Image (cartoon, grey):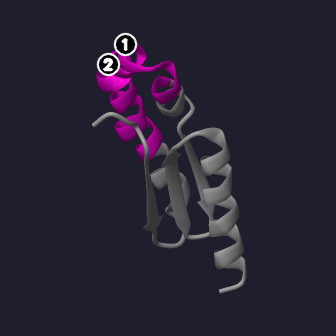
Amino acid sequence: SNNADQFGVFRVKEGCAADCKRLLEEEYLSPLLEEKGDFYRSYTAKEAEKLEEAEVRVFGNYVIYAILDVRERNDLFSAAEHALRNG
C-alpha cells in the first residue's frame, strides 16, 4: 500500500483495557514500525511519520489505535470520545 493509514476500535472486558493497549503497542505497532518503517521512510517521510507517531488510547472499555496524521488522529479520538460519552 502507498500509505500507512489505519485505525482499529476494540471493545474489551472490564479491567482488560490496559493489557489490550500494551499488546497493541508492543505486539502490533512496534513490529509494524520495525517491518515497514524503512519502506515508508524510503517512500515518503509523511507516511513514516504516521507510523512512528501511531497512538493507542483507552476510553473506558474501548481501546483505539490510530496510524494517521496528527489532525486525523486527533479528530478520530475526539469523535470516539464524544460518541462514547453521549452514547
The residue pinned by badge 2 equals 39
Q: What amino acid is found at the position of numbered circle 1 in the picture?
A: Ser
- In-image side of 22 versus 87 (left or right): left
19 vs 53, nearest the viewer: 53
54 vs 14, nearest the viewer: 54
In contact (CB < 8 Å): disc 1 and disc 2: yes
For the point 49% across and 44% down, the residue is: 22
Range shown magenta: 23-48
- Can you tell which quarter of the image residue 83 is in? bottom right
Q: Residue 73: say if magenta.
A: no
Give percent across and percent down for residue 78: 70, 62
Cα distance, mark 1 to mark 2? 5 Å
Q: What amino acid is found at the position of numbered circle 2 in the picture?
A: Phe
- Can you tell which quarter of the image residue 38 is in? top left
What is the crowding at mark 2: few (fewer than 14 residues within 10 Å), some, or many (at least 20)?
some
Q: Secondary structure at mark 2?
A: helix
The residue pinned by badge 1 equals 42
Give percent across and percent down for residue 7: 45, 53
Q: Is residue 65 above or below residue 61?
A: above
Quadrant, the C terminus: bottom right
